[in-house]
Image (spheres, coloured by chain):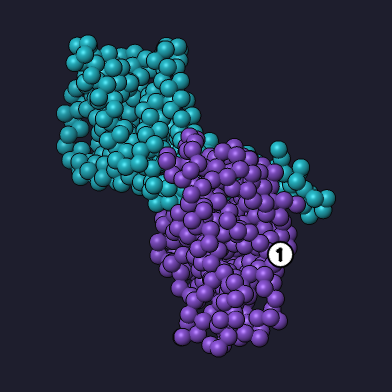
Chain colours: A purple, B cyan
C-alpha cells in the first residue's frame, strides 16, 4: 500500500520556491528520513503532506487530499512538530482528556502506561515540565494513537542526548511495527541512521537523492586509507575525501568491497558524510535549476 | 475518497475504518468548547470575581439597611421599587459589562494566541476541523458567556436578597416590601431574555468581526480590530461630510432597542413590555447575523491557511 504519493509537488512563498517539483512515494512499513540543509524545503514538504499548507501538483496521503481533508486525514496520521508546540497552559490530565475526547483512535490506557514510566505528574502544566518531559508527553500522546502514518519534524530539537536516545528507542520498541509508516526530518542524522529503512536528500526544493538503507549500505563505503595507498585509492575515483588525524578518509560509490579492503579499513559511512558528498556534487546544478525556473503564484 | 478505498482486506483494518463513525459528531465540538474554558479561565473567574466584589460591597451596605428601610416605605410604589432594586440592577449591569469585556478580549486572542505560541500545530494534528474549532470559539461569547453571566447574576441577586432578609428579620422589621418589590424569578427571566436577544444575537457580528481579526492579524489584533472601522468613519466624514457608518456602529453597540421598546428603561425590570416579534422581524438583527456568518466563514478559511507566526 502506498502511504504518500507526490507528483510534481510545487510550493512558492512569493519569489522563494520552497518545493520545486517534488516526486516521492512512500510505501507502508517504511521509516523514511528526509535529510536536507536549512531552508531546503523539508518542513514545507511535511506541511503539504499534513494539510497545513496549500500546494500545486498532485499529492495523496492514505488516498486523501491533505489540503481539503485535513481533519479526516488526522484520524490516521499523527505528527510531532518540534516539541515546543504543546500549549503551555494545558495540564497533562487535560491533554489526555482532550485527545481522548476528539480522537477516535486514542487509547488512553496506553498513554497512561507510557507516562507511568516517566516522572511526569498528571497535575503538572506543560509550562512546568522540562523540554525533555514535554517531548515524552507528546510522544506518549502520539504513540497511544493507532495511526497509519507518523510524521516527525525535528522531533528531538533542543533535547539532551539522553532524551534523544530514549525518544528513538521508545519509537522503535513500543510503537513501530511493519504496518506503520514513519517520516522523519532531522539534523541529528547520526541518531536516525540505524533507525531508517529509507533515505532521501532534499535540496532547494528538490529530491536530489533517494535510496533504501540496504542499498545505501551496499553502495557507499568509506575507507580509512593507509598512507602509502592514497594514490591508488584516489585512482578509484572517490566521491569525497576528508582528513582526520592526518589520515585520509575516502568515500566511494559503487566500488567493490574486496578491492577497497586492500587499501585500508572499510566501513559503512555516516549519512552525514554521504550527504556532504552528494550535496557538494549536486549543489551547483540544483542551484542553476532553481533559479532558472519561472516563479509561479504562491497559491 | 474515504479510507475504505485504501484498506487492504484485513479484519483489523476493517474495524479501524468503522471506528470513526462510532464517534459522535458533537464530541469534538464539546471537547473544543471545554478546551477553550480550560485555556481562558477568565471566562468564569472574571464574572465570579466581580460578583464577589459586588457581594462584599453589598455586605457593608446591608448593615445600614434597617435604618434606611423606613424612608423607603414612605415612598410611592414606583420609587419604592427603584430604591429597593437599585443594587440588584447595578449588580446585573456590572456583570453584563464584565461579560462584554471578557468576550471582547477572549475573541481578540482566540485565533491569534494559538498561532503566536505555535500550539496551532498541535491542535491541527488532531482530527478536529477548522469549522469545529472556529464555531467552538464563537460559542464562548455567543452562548457560554451569556448563560454563565445569567447564572452568576441570579445567584448573586439571590444571595443579596437573602442577606437583606436576614438583616431585616434580625432587626425585627418587615420584609414584605422587599419580597413584593423584588420578584427574582421574573427578574431572572427578563435578564435571560435581554442576554440572549441583545448580548448574544444582536452583538454577534461584533464578536464575529473580532474573531476574524484575531485569525488574520499577525500582531496588535486590538488595533486591527479598531482602526479600520475608525478609518472608514474618518474617511466618510471628510469625503462626504456624513456619518452613516458611525451611526451604524452606534446602532449596533447601543443595540437591540427592538427587543425592548422603551429605551432608557432598565431592560431587565419586570414589567418592561417585551417585543420578541418586533425584535425577530427587525432587519437589523438579520443583517447582523448574515454579517456574523460571513465573518465566521472567513475566519474558518483563514485558519486553514494560517500557521504559526
Question: Pointer 1: what residue?
Answer: A177
**In the visual, does B251 lie left or right of A271?**
left
Task: Please state which of residues B99 and B21 is positioned toward the viewer in this rendering.
Answer: B21
- The quarter of the picture where residue B289 lies is top left
The image position of residue A84, as x and y in percent, is 44, 59
Task: Give the secondary structure at mark 1.
Answer: loop
Q: Residue at x 49, y 47 (%)?
A: A290
Judge by depth and name the residue closer to the eye, A216 or B190: A216
Q: Within 10 angstroms of label 1, few (less than 14), some, or many (20 or more) residues? A: few
Whether residue B3 can be seen here: yes
Q: Residue at x 64, y 44 (%)?
A: A7
| A45 displayed left or right of B282 | right
Image coordinates for residue A213, horizontal then vertical, percent: 66, 67
Position of residue B22 in the picture relative to residue A113 (left or right): right
Q: How many marks?
A: 1
Q: Quadrant of residue A225?
A: bottom right
Q: Does residue B92 appear to the left or right of B205 in the view shown? A: left
- The picture places residue A252, in percent across and down from the top left corner, at 61, 73
Which residue is nearer to you in this view: A71 or A89? A71
The relative height of residue A136 versus residue B218 in the rendered view (above or below) is below
The chain ID associated with circle 1 is A
Q: Which residue corresponds to the image point at 50% horizontal and 41% vertical from the top-left?
A: A293
Q: Position of residue A74 (x, y in %)?
A: 61, 48
Q: Quadrant of residue A58?
A: top right
Amino acid at each position: 500500500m502506498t502511504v504518500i504519493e507526490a507528483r510534481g509537488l510545487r510550493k512558492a512563498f512569493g519569489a522563494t520556491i520552497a518545493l520545486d517539483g517534488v516526486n516521492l512515494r512512500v510505501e507502508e512499513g517504511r521509516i523514511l528520513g528526509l535529510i536536507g540543509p536549512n531552508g531546503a524545503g523539508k518542513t514545507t514538504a511535511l506541511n503539504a503532506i499534513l494539510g497545513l499548507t496549500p500546494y500545486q501538483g498532485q499529492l495523496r496521503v492514505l488516498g486523501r487530499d491533505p489540503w481539503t481533508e485535513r481533519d479526516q486525514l488526522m484520524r490516521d496520521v499523527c505528527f510531532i512538530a518540534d516539541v515546543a508546540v504543546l500549549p503551555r497552559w494545558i495540564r497533562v490530565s487535560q491533554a489526555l482528556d482532550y485527545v481522548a475526547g476528539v480522537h477516535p483512535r486514542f487509547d488512553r490506557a496506553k498513554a497512561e502506561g507510557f507516562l507511568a514510566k516517566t516522572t511526569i505528574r498528571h497535575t503538572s502544566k506543560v509550562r512546568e515540565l522540562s523540554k525533555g518531559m514535554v517531548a515524552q508527553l507528546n510522544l506518549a500522546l502520539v504513540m497511544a494513537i493507532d495511526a497509519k502514518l507518523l510524521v516527525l519534524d525535528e522531533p528531538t530539537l533542543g533535547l539532551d542526548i539522553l532524551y534523544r536516545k530514549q525518544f528513538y528507542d521508545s519509537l522503535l520498541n513500543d510503537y513501530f511495527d511493519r504496518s506503520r509508516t514513519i517520516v522523519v526530518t532531522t539534523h541529528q542524522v547520526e541518531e536516525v541512521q540505524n533507525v531508517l529503512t529509507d533515505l532521501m536528500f532534499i535540496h532547494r526544493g528538490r529530491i536530489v537523492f533517494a535510496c533504501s538503507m540496504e542499498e545505501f549500505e551496499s553502495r557507499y563505503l568509506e575507507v580509512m586509507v593507509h598512507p602509502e595507498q592514497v594514490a591508488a585509492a584516489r585512482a578509484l575515483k572517490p566521491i569525497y575525501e576528508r582528513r582526520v588525524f592526518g589520515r585520509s578518509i575516502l568515500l566511494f560509490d559503487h566500488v567493490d568491497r574486496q578491492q577497497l579492503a586492500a587499501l585500508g579499513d572499510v566501513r559503512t559511512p555516516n549519512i552525514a558524510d554521504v550527504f556532504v558528498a552528494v550535496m557538494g556534487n549536486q549543489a551547483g546544478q540544483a542551484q542553476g535549476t532553481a533559479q532558472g525556473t519561472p516563479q509561479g503564484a504562491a497559491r | 475518497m474515504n479510507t475504505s478505498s485504501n484498506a487492504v482486506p484485513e479484519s483489523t483494518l476493517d474495524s479501524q475504518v468503522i471506528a470513526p463513525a462510532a464517534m459522535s459528531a458533537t464530541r469534538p465540538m464539546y471537547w473544543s468548547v471545554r478546551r477553550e474554558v480550560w485555556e481562558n479561565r477568565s471566562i468564569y473567574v472574571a464574572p465570579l470575581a466581580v460578583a464577589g466584589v459586588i457581594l462584599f460591597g453589598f455586605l457593608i451596605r446591608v448593615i445600614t439597611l434597617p435604618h434606611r428601610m423606613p424612608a423607603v416605605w414612605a415612598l410611592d410604589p414606583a420609587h419604592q421599587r427603584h430604591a429597593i432594586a437599585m443594587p440588584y440592577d447595578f449588580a446585573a449591569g456590572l456583570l453584563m459589562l464584565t461579560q462584554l469585556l471578557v468576550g471582547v478580549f477572549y475573541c481578540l486572542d482566540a485565533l491569534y494566541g494559538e498561532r503566536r505560541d505555535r500550539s496551532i500545530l498541535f491542535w491541527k494534528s488532531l482530527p478536529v476541523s477548522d469549522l469545529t474549532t472556529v464555531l467552538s470559539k464563537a460559542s464562548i461569547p455567543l452562548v457560554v458567556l451569556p448563560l454563565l453571566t445569567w447564572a452568576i447574576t441570579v445567584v448573586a441577586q439571590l444571595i443579596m436578597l437573602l442577606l437583606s432578609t436576614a438583616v431585616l428579620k434580625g432587626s425585627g422589621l418587615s420584609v414584605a416590601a422587599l419580597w413584593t418589590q423584588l420578584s427574582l424569578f421574573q427578574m431572572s427571566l427578563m435578564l435571560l431574555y435581554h442576554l440572549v436577544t441583545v448580548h448574544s444575537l444582536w452583538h454577534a457580528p461584533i464578536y464575529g468581526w473580532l474573531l476574524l481579526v484575531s485569525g488574520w492579524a499577525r500582531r496588535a489584533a486590538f488595533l486591527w480590530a479598531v482602526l479600520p472601522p475608525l478609518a472608514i468613519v474618518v474617511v466618510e466624514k471628510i469625503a462626504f461630510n456624513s456619518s452613516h457608518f458611525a451611526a451604524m456602529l452606534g446602532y449596533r453597540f447601543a443595540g437591540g432597542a427592538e427587543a425592548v421598546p422603551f429605551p432608557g428603561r432598565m431592560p431587565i425590570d419586570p414589567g418592561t413590555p417585551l417585543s420578541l416579534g418586533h425584535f425577530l422581524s427587525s432587519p437589523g438583527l438579520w443583517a447582523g447575523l448574515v454579517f456574523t456568518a460571513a465573518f465566521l466563514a472567513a475566519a474558518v478559511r483563514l485558519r486553514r491557511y494560517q500557521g504559526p507566526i
